[in-house]
Amino acid sequence: TGRYVVGRGRPQSEFDAEVVFRACERFGTAVEINSRPERLDPPNDLLALAVEVGCRFAINTDAHAPGQLEWQPYGADKAVETGVSIDRVVNSWSTDELLKWTRR
């Protein structure tokens, strides 16, 4: 949503999340969980909605340097908090499963 949760902060963007998440589910597009500490995006209420709609997810670090790869657990924690099951996290799949999904 583009928000910042630290420093001077920035609010999340305004959009019809249900419409977006339903489109993601319909067209097989993963919702990004951004693990960057100042982002931790999307917020839990939107993640819960995406779970309810049936979306898949990709947890990433938004890393700009090798040491920032250590942020992955922050996104994984958000996923657990909001009920994202591991089978819906595309970057937890085997290479074969992921490639099959991307070829659809």
Image (spheres, helix red, strand yellow):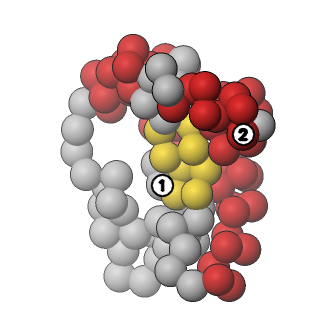
Residue 76 in sight from this viewpoint: yes
Residue ID for mark 2 = 95
Above-or-below relation of 24 to 9: above
Q: Give the mark nearest the N terminus, 1 or 2.
A: 1
At a point 69% along the width and 63% down the height, the residue shown is 72
* Residue 23 rendering spot, x and y as whole percentages: 33, 21
Vertical side of 37 occupied by 64: above or below? below
x%, y% of residue 60?
A: 58, 57
Q: Secondary structure at mark 1?
A: loop
Q: Quadrant of residue 15?
A: top left
Q: Residues within 10 Å of mark 2 (few under 14, many from 20)?
A: few
Residue 68 relative to residue 47: left or right: right
- Residue displayed at 51% across by 67% down: 62
Whole-percent x and y of residue 80? Answer: 74, 41
How many numbered callouts? 2
In the rendered structure, the answer to whether residue 103 lies left or right of residue 75 reads: left
Q: Is residue 24 left or right of residue 92?
A: left
Q: Amino acid at mark 2?
A: Thr
Look at 73% across and 52% down and name the residue there: 77
Which of the 4 quarters of the picture holds residue 70? Answer: bottom right
Q: Looking at the image, can residue 18 be seen? A: no
Q: Which residue matches tag 1?
A: 41
- The numbered mark at residue 102 is none
Q: Residues within 10 Å of mark 1 (few under 14, many from 20)?
A: many
Viewer-proximal residue among 52 and 93 = 93
Dividing the picture into quadrants, the one containing residue 101 is: top right
Q: Nearer the viewer, mark 1 or mark 2?
A: 2
| Dot 2: element | helix
| Three-letter code, disc 1 | Asp
Against 51, is 57 above or below?
A: below
As measured in the structure, the alpha-carbon distance from the residue carrying label 1 to the one carrying label 2 is 26 Å
